[in-house]
Image (spheres, rainbow, N blue to C red):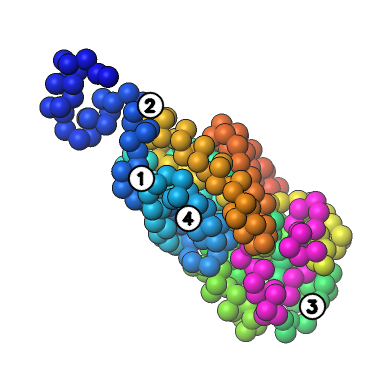
Amino acid sequence: MLPPLRRRLIAGLPAAALAAALPASARAQAWPTRPVRLVIPFPAGGATDIIGRTLATRLGATLGQQVVVENRPGAGGSIGADAVAKAPADGYTLLMGTGSTHSVGPAINPKMPYDAFRDFAPVAHVANAPSVLVVGAGFPARTVQELVALLRRSPGRYNFGSSGIGTYPHLSAEMFKWRAGGLFVVHIPYRGTGLVITDLVSGQIAFLMDSVVSAQPHIRDGKVRALAVSGERRSPSLPDVPTFAEAGIAGMDISNWFGAFVPAGTPADILSRLNRDLNAAVRAPEVLERLERAGAEPAGGSPEQFARLIRADHENWKAVIRRAGIKPE
């Protein structure tokens, strides 16, 4: 119980100062008192959206407040990420970030509207997802080697799509072009994966490097054909699809990560509670089942572990961009 003098002083404080005056343990117990917003910086239906919505329901039940999902797509995820970077650091605004927003994008675009390392506090690494190389069901190439041969015969004739400049799908495709011996294929950026799939199916673009999570439904319904998956082993959700190494393309052991962030300056006690509750959400049986069915690999860990992963991934992509000669568009 607070001493009488401290109680009188606190009673006269405005709401914002009142929250700061409370002991950390009391503030963490009081938070949240209203719904929490989870910003998804990509359109509905993509991998980030699927993973974010899967976690939001469980997290809301744990917090005792609704977690409202808000899609803020555009500019390769930077519009939504920037909105969170500039939001109040009070624990009521979270970002479902990815390698696109925090490692790949900043590695290729030095003019991002936010600083990926200074403007955010990493909360928890929640999932990973390998990439899959897909073509339209009617496209003439049925294997990776057939696709490479076709692209080599007609340099500059074919296009590939992505969910935006500097996103994981963009850089994964650039890495494939490089690892395949230097293919000349034109990049067409879109506002989201759904639009890319439409043009892939109609034959407007030749291929897409997408997350297994967002590509899997289209593979299953026969709209697109999977040629290879990234990573060291086959995806459990696509067991018949070879890895790039099995298909003859080495060096494609890449995987996109997904994780929660809050604005820098968010109180440490709120950050700690969010980390604890997100780790619990990722381990919940219904969340595990949904993530694994979607093709994602559940993760977890401390904010410090997540921060190290982001930095290492960022440095890795900087090296790839430099070696492959990839330029900002």
Q: Which residue lies under the disc numbered 4?
A: 57
Residues at discs 3 and 4 in contact (Cβ within 8 Å): no
Q: CA distance from mark 2 to mark 1?
A: 17 Å
Circle nearer the N terminus (1, 4)? 4
Question: For residue 221: magenta?
Answer: yes
Ranked by sequence position, the earlier of labels 2 and 4 is 2
Q: Residue at x 33, y 35 (%)?
A: 30
**Was residue 160 drawn as part of the magenta stretch in this picture?**
no
Q: Is residue 257 left or right of residue 121?
A: right
**Please, is residue 128 above or below residue 150 in the view?**
above
- Quick check: 306 above or below 194? above
Residue in the picture at 52% in, 43% down: 278
Going by the image, does 280 lie left or right of 8?
A: right
Q: Which residue is mark 1?
A: 92
Residue interval drawn in magenta: 213-239
Residue 290's x, y, as percent? 62, 59
Q: Work out whether mark 2 precedes mark 1 in sequence or the reverse, and give the earlier one.
A: 2
The amino acid type found where label 3 is placed reads: Ala
The kind of residue on which mark 2 rests is Ser
Q: Residue at x 35, y 45 (%)?
A: 92
Label 2 or label 1, whichever lies nearer to me, is 2
Measured along the vertical axis of the image, is residue 3 above or below residue 42?
Answer: above
Residue designated by label 2: 25
Disc 3 secondary structure class: loop
> Disc 2 or disc 3, which is closer to the eye?
2
**248 horizontally vs 29: left or right:** right
